[in-house]
Image: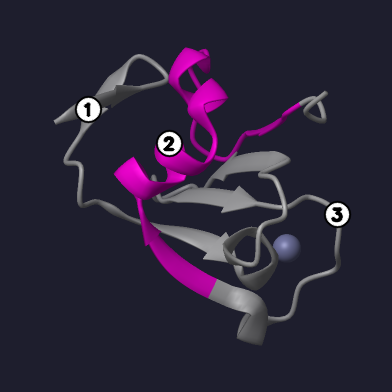
Amino acid sequence: MLRLAGEEFPESLACITCSHVLEGHPIGLVARDEDGDWQFLCGTFAHQVSDGRLISISSAIELEPRLSSLKAVPLGASVTLEPRK
Ligand SMILES: [Zn+2]
């Protein structure tokens, strides 16, 4: 299990990301669906359904270690990450 935003999740939990993040674009937007699914998106480009990818929650935190310090994200809410320096 790992902790994210004050809750525990299985490390292999599938989350939604976009092709841009997997191509190296930083994660800029964290969103939580009403059903609890996490989305870790670039927050930069417009997205089509075909841009969606699956990633494990542990991989997302490896890509963006700042996720570890996220405060609680309520269902249906989203958080913007400051661009990395
Ligand atoms: Zn994207």
The percent coordinates of residue 38 (x first, y second) are 46, 47
Number of the label disc, if any, that sits on residue 48:
none
Magenta highlight on residue 58: yes
Q: Secondary structure at mark 2?
A: helix
Mark 3 CB in 8 Å range of ligand 1?
yes
Other-residue count near label 3 (Cα within 10 Å), few / some / many at <14 / 14–19 / ≥20: few
Number of the label disc, if any, that sits on residue 44:
3
Residue type at the position of mark 1 = Leu
Query: Magenta span covers which residues?
Result: 53-81
Which quarter of the rendered picture does the N terminus lie within? top left
Q: Ligand 1 is located in which of the four quadrants? A: bottom right
Residue at the image position 55 percent from the left and 22 percent from the top: 66
Residue at the image position 76 percent from the left and 72 percent from the top: 47
Q: Quadrant of residue 77?
A: top right
Number of the label disc, if any, that sits on residue 61:
2
Residue at the image position 54 percent from the left and 60 percent from the top: 17
Q: Measure the C-alpha gap from mark 1 to mark 2.
A: 10 Å
